[in-house]
Amino acid sequence: MARSALVVAFCLCFSLSADALSGEPSWEELKPQQREVLAPLAQEWNNMDSAKKKKWLGIAKRYSGMTPAEQHRAQLQMRDWFSLTPEQRELVREKYKTIKKLPPEKRHEIKQKWREYEQTSEDHRGK
């Protein structure tokens, strides 16, 4: 009897730790700090696959070490990403893959142009 209880306890502990490692927590199972950081993802969270959850949990873990500007940027990026349609997200992924294949100097040039674009006022962007 004691041995079977020990086996059950061991299995329960193992399954709980396996769930934690698999990146499968539901939104309700996240810690309050994680939910706060990942709030823009709340509606999508339970439908995400393990790999995506793991990625976002990694960002949440690093969040407290970010500067306020980095935290703000991370929040905006989350909101922007999840405001895109699935088709738009796929297009962004494809563009990212294309850019990653470019030589480093070309990627640097694209980053520089993007920074210049971000620094222009919204009034001048569309013109």
Image: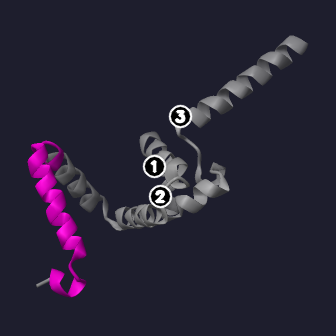
What amino acid does circle 2 point to? Glu
Q: Name the residue under label 2.
A: 44
**Percent from the top left, x then y, of residue 61?**
54, 48
**Percent from the top left, x then y, of residue 2?**
90, 14
Crowd rating for badge 3 (residues with CA inside 10 Å; few <14, some 14–19, many 20+): few
Question: Tag 1 or tag 3, which sits nearer the N-term?
Answer: 3
CB of mark 1 within 8 Å of CB of mark 2?
yes
Calculate the distance from the C-alpha at mark 2 to the C-alpha at mark 3: 18 Å
| Residue 41 seen in render | yes
Residue 102 inside the magenta-drawn segment: yes
Please report the residue visible at 59 percent of the width from the left and 54 percent of the height from the top.
34
Mark 2 against mark 3, which lies toward the viewer? 3
In the rendered image of this protein, does residue 97 appear above or below residue 42?
A: above
Q: Name the residue under label 1.
A: 48
CB of mark 3 within 8 Å of CB of mark 1?
no
Q: In which quarter of the image is residue 81?
A: bottom left
| Residue 1 seen in render | no
Furthest toward the right, the residue is 1
Q: What stretch is highlighted in magenta?
A: 99-125
Please report the residue visible at 16 percent of the width from the left and 85 percent of the height from the top.
124
Q: Mark 3 points at which residue?
A: 22
Please report the residue visible at 18 percent of the width from the left and 70 percent of the height from the top.
116
